[in-house]
């Protein structure tokens, strides 16, 4: 864990606040790459993941943008209502499940709402590298467009298109037109609310984009229906111990009940912290941090949310 001080807290929009975090002694923070996120440990024991949105070349600070979610499970409301300038918090080192593909000839960046945080970091990195890219930023209206001034004053402003679905006249992004002609060297990156990302990715796939060209990052997993969940077994490769996983508990919950030291954070399959190697068995993947290709390979398993289709899974624990 890293101790950080809240150097500043300001509002980008009525419901998005920007926190600047730095070490209390001003020393350098761990380096990070565009698309990375940190775990933020909040009062009351909550842990939430937020994308870093400052330039990845900076080492003296991290910036995160936090949307007040009306359906918050406590994280965003805590940041907005209880975290103040001068407070000391703990964070994890940055992790990146949403990296840029540096072999790409062109990068197509698409942000929806608060999904702009990793996308903006990517744009600044690509501009610094002199790479080919364009950015599309979708919000309801101009007043809910965080970082607009920062983008308009950047040296890549001419490569950014703003789309406002509820302004008059509407400038809603036409995903079908934008994605109609995929090129092998172009990679697409999308972040935002789950329905927004699903629409973009489904439109891209229908237009012939390959799975390896598509990159996304989820802030939250969709609700999972547990009605058909059943019991199964997990075998620990290190000891051979076989553990029963009941229908009403996750693998992670059972392992923690046995006082096993398993790293975890989001507990809903978003962050990848708890992922372990899968050695045998057929999993029922329910996480959103792995790609379809990674699910198909069955090399990793998210014990916080995923279950088994086979009677037993053998995990590298």
Image (cartoon, rainbow, N blue to C red):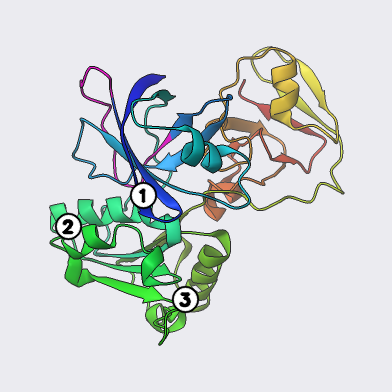
Task: Give the residue drawn at x 86%, y 48%.
Answer: 228
> Between 217 and 45, which is closer to the camera in this rendering?
45
Q: What is the crowding at mark 3: few (fewer than 14 residues within 10 Å), some, or many (at least 20)? A: some
In primary-sequence order, the first of circles 1 and 2 is: 1
Q: In which quadrant of the rendered image does the C terminus lie? A: top right
Which residue is the site of mark 2? 127
| Drawn side of residue 299 relative to residue 186, left or right | right
In primary-sequence order, the first of circles 3 and 1 is: 1
Point out the frontmost of discs 1 and 2.
Answer: 1
Which residue is the site of mark 1? 11
Point out the frontmost of discs 2 and 3.
Answer: 2
Q: In which quadrant of the rendered image does the N terminus lie? A: top left
Q: Is residue 105 magenta?
A: no
Q: What is the crowding at mark 2: few (fewer than 14 residues within 10 Å), some, or many (at least 20)? A: some
Point out the frontmost of discs 3 and 1.
Answer: 1
Name of the residue lying farthest toward the bottom: 169
* Cα distance between the residues tagged 1 and 2: 25 Å
| Drawn side of residue 174 relative to residue 301, left or right | left
* Cα distance between the residues tagged 2 and 3: 28 Å
Label 1: state its secondary structure: strand
* Cα distance between the residues tagged 3 and 1: 40 Å
Task: Give the residue drawn at x 47%, y 73%.
Answer: 204
Percent across and percent down for residue 19 are: 35, 39
State whether residue 312 is above or below residue 103.
above
Label 2: state its secondary structure: helix
Percent across and percent down for residue 109 are: 34, 63
Which residue is the site of mark 3? 208
Q: What is the crowding at mark 1: few (fewer than 14 residues within 10 Å), some, or many (at least 20)? A: some
The residue range painted magenta reads: 23-38
> Between 93 and 40, which is closer to the camera in this rendering?
40
């Amino acid at each position: 864990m890293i101790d950080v001080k809240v150097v500043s807290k300001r509002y980008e929009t009525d419901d998005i606040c920007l926190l600047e975090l730095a070490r209390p002694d001003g020393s350098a923070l761990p380096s990070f790459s565009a698309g990375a996120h940190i775990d933020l440990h909040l009062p009351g024991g909550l842990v939430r993941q937020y994308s870093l949105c400052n330039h990845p070349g900076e080492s003296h600070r991290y910036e995160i943008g936090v949307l007040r979610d009306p359906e918050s499970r406590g994280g965003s409301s805590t940041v907005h209502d209880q975290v103040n300038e001068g407070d000391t918090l703990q964070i994890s080192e940055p992790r990146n499940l949403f990296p840029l593909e540096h072999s790409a000839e062109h990068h197509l960046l698409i942000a929806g709402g608060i999904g702009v945080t990793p996308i903006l970091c990517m744009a600044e990195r690509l501009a610094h590298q002199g790479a080919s890219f364009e950015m599309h930023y979708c919000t309801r209206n101009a007043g809910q467009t965080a970082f607009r001034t920062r983008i308009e004053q950047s040296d890549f402003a001419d490569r950014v298109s703003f789309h406002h679905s509820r302004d008059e006249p509407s400038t809603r992004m036409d995903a079908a037109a934008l994605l109609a002609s995929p090129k092998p060297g172009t990679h697409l990156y999308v972040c935002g609310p789950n329905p927004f990302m699903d629409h973009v990715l489904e439109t891209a796939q229908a237009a012939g984009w390959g799975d390896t060209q598509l990159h996304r990052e989820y802030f939250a997993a969709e609700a999972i229906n547990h009605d058909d969940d059943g019991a199964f077994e997990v075998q620990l490769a290190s000891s051979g111990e076989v553990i029963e996983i009941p229908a009403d508990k996750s693998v992670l919950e059972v392992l923690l009940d046995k006082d096993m030291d398993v790293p975890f954070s989001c507990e809903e399959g978003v962050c990848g912290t708890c992922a372990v190697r899968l050695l045998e068995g057929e999993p029922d993947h329910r996480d959103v941090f792995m790609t379809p290709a990674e699910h198909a390979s069955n090399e990793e398993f998210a014990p916080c949310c995923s279950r088994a289709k086979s009677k037993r899974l053998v995990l590298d624990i």
